[in-house]
Structure formats: structure tokens, C-alpha cells
Image: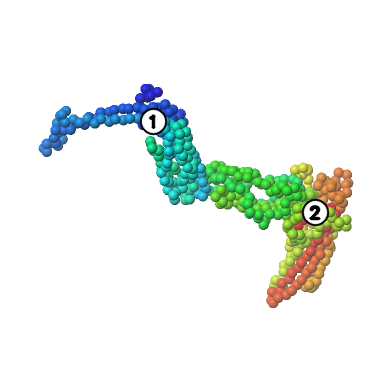
Amino acid sequence: MKEIFGFTFSRLDKHFKKVLRSEQYEKARTSLLYSYTQRYNEHIVPCFISDGDPPEEDRQAQPTWSPFNALYLKLQCPVVRPALMVTSDNGQTIVDFRRVSVGETMIKRFTVQNISDESLQMRTSVLDTLGPFSLLNALRVIRPGGKRTLVLAFSPAEEKKHCEILEIKTTKMSLELTLCGEGVFPTITSSHPGGLLDFGYVFEKERISEVVQDGVDTVDILLGSYTDSQVQPTVGTQNYSGLSVFSVVPGEGSIAPGQSQNVTITFQPDHPSVNYSDKLTIELMNKSKVCVMDLKGAASSHHMYLHGGDVLTVPIESLLPPLPAAPGEKGIPVLVTLCARSSGGAVIPAVRELQVGCVCTTQHSKKSGEFSWDDVGSLQEQGFSVEPSKGAVESGQKCTITVTWTPQSGYKPYDVVQTCVSLTLRGDESAWLNGPNSTTRGEQAMPRKPLVNMRIQTVCPYSGTLPLTSFHAALFATCGLDLVKYTR
């Protein structure tokens, strides 16, 4: 091949590299370096000297030349094989880190081989100590035929392009390595704006998932851990089994420029509770936060549930299963506090909202649930009203019940008003059949009516010219079924 080409390597590059800028060209060049031994060329360059200057009258006249005044320059050009050869990246001496997020570190490796007959001690030039490039490993002696890998790091601290020359020196030659890269601030978006992510109600031991999409516009990024390492005060009830209530897939990864990554968040409780909560943080490797979400969910053991009212229990629950209910206990009370005000002689009614929902499940048929209030007339006599008084709720949906109290004429402050009303919830057979007090009629399980005892306490203190009236109403709901913690 040396006789066919008949070029030095510089001339080979000049004539062929424009056409063969490919991996095949680099492999052929490497093969030539391995097989090349040495070459010695001599070139004689004649230098002619004129006999004198042209006459002043005609400066354009050709000067006279004499062969006796000729000088001959002899060029001796020995060509030897280099001591070091680049074996990584097809022999390229440019290490391009491309775009790297500010605050992150990109690692690349550069390998050279000793193709000489002697051992070589390598040393390098000093990189800018305040620059983004650094050499991470020490250089040792390379024996003939041995290889050495240089570990290079690029850690940009500002948004701009960087370039630096690293010179690898031996006693026989020097090799220049060009380091380049660009520091950028990535533009990252999330399909979820952050804040609350409520999974709603699910059946115990079932699961529901939400997908959050993260996208990046300008640069490859690495996603860090999705959960904070520190214990968060927002962590609520945990599963009895010890498994995580909320899980995230994938736990980490990278996103290429212009691409997106789906993050799947799964809620899987194993017992009824309304206090499931946690905090999810999606962050980059440089600790900058992409999205912070407060996760919340509830689990029910029955098809229908009632949600709302005042909190009667602490949000932190024991990991032990609840104690069995007493034989005479009919359910768990629900407290609703109503506050009405009087301003300028006009009474502003007190309004509270309750949620009646129907759990959507993957194991049972999607049937709707029903609810109804009994003896609404007794409520109206005390100034109470509920809207709607009955209705149906589709699977996976919920209905808002508005409870309103307007004091009757002649009401005296500090008087206690008390009344009771019954609320009936009917659900799918598969959801109600296991209730301890339910009875079956044909194919439909009919639970007994859960009682809702409404006790109203009112206090009316007056202050100055702006009278203020506070009305407190206690709504106690007791159910014939053992609806453990289906309300809060």
C-alpha cells in the first residue's frame, strides 16, 4: 500500500480526507501507522541569485542570472512512526462533550497506545485550574504495545462554550488533544404543575396509576431520585404489609433533547383509610427541582362512601389492624360544624358540603350507587335543609350534598337546637354483600339504613354595632354496616 499511495501521511490527509471522512478512513489510517516503519527523503531546492539590481530607468526589466551565483538548498526529511497512537474514537484527537447542564459533570475517556519499541513516561500540560475541564487519573509508564486511558471530566459552571488544549508529552513526541463542550441551562417542563395530586377513593388492595410526563428542550439531563431522602412530615398512613403505598417508575433515568419521559405514580393501599399521603420530588442530578407534588389518596372497603365533615381522629394511624367494634356500636360518627353570621341585621345562612361517592373498581361491574335522606320534614322545622335529598352516583363519580341551616324567627342566642335524620346508602351487591348487618333480597344485597343524628348547638354573642352570630351544628352519622373509616 505504501508503493500504491506514495504519499506521506500529511499528503494523504490533504488528498483523501475530504472524501473519506468516515470510520473506514480512520481505520485505514490506523492500519498504515501500525505497518509503517520509516522513510528518508531528500529534496534539493535551487535558489538563483541575480547579478545585480534592474536599472533605475526600467525597473520592470528582467534581471540577469548567472549559474555561478546559484545556491542549492538540500532538505533532508526523515519520516518515522509516531510513538503514541490514538485508539479511541477511531483516532480522533478532539474530545467533544457537547451540551452539558450547568452544575453537572460529564465523563469521557481517551485511549492512547505505545506503538514504539521503548517504554514511555507520559506527562501532560496543566489545564486551567479555574476552567471546566479536568484530568481525573494519574499517568504511568506505558510499555511497548501497552495502552493508557485518560479519564477527562467536563463540569461547566456557566452557560457558554468552552475549549482548551491538553498536550500529552513524551521524550519522543507530543500529542495535542482538543477538549470542547458547552454549558447550558436545560429547559424542562412537566405535565403536572406541582402541588396536590389526589387519587381519590379506591378499593382496598386495588391499585390506580397516574402518569406525569417530563420533557426537555435543549440538553441531555439525568433525573435524580424521585423521593427525598429525608423523612417528610407529609407522610401519612402506611400499609400493614410494609410495602409502599405510593410507588414511582422509573426511579431515575435520562432524557435526550426534545424527548420526554413518562413517570408512572401508583397508589396501592391495603386497608381502609383516608389518611394516605406522601410527598414526591422530581429533581435533576444538580439538585434543582423539576416538580414537587403532594400525593393523597383514600381507600374504602365498600362500594359507597361518605366524605366530609370535621376531623374527629388524628391523621397518624397505628400500623396495627383496628380493634373489633363493640357489639352495640352502630358505626363511626361524622361531625359537621356550621357557622352562620349576622351582619347589618341580616342572617347569612351556614353552609357545609358533604361528598357521597361511588368507588370505581376493576374487580366488580361498574354499577351506580344510590343515596337518600329520610324524614327531611323534621329538618326543615329546625331550619335545616339538604340538597339533593336523594340521587344516584355513577361508578367513579361523586355527588356534593349541601347542608344549610338558617335560624328560625325567635331563635335566642346560646340556645341548643337538636334534631335527627336518617341517610341511606345503597351500593353494588359485590360491595355490600360482606357487610355484617346486610340482608339479601334476590340478587341485591340491601343494607339497613344508616342513621344520621344531627345535633345543633347555637351561640349568638353580640359585639358593638356589628352583631356576630355563631351556629354550631353537629352531624353524627351511624351506619348499620361496619363502614370502618369510610369517612373522616
Q: Residues within 10 Å of mark 2 (few under 14, many from 20)?
A: few
Quarter of the picture holding the N terminus: top left
Nearer-the-camera pick, 308 or 333: 333
* Residue 354 at least partly seen: no
Comparing 95 with 117, the one in front is 117
Residue at position x 47%, y 51% in the image: 158
Above/below status of 49 relative to 265: above
The percent coordinates of residue 283 (x first, y second) are: 58, 50
Q: Residue at x 75, y 61 (%)?
A: 310
Task: Answer with the quarter of the image where residue 178 lies.
Answer: top left
Give the left or right position of residue 75, taking residue 91 as reference: left
Please, what is the three-letter code of the amino acid marked with disc 1?
Answer: Arg
Residue 338 picture quarter: bottom right
Is residue 32 shown left or right of residue 400?
left
Q: Which mark is residue 81?
A: 1
The residue under the point 72% across, 51% down is: 238
Q: Quadrant of the C terminus?
A: bottom right
* Position of residue 209 in the picture relative to residue 109 (left or right): right
Residue linked to disc 2: 322
Q: Using a 10 Å C-alpha cutoff, classify the residue at mark 1 as few (fewer than 14 neighbours), some (14 to 19) or many (20 or more).
A: some
The reply to whether residue 317 is in sight is: yes
Q: Which mark is residue 214?
A: none
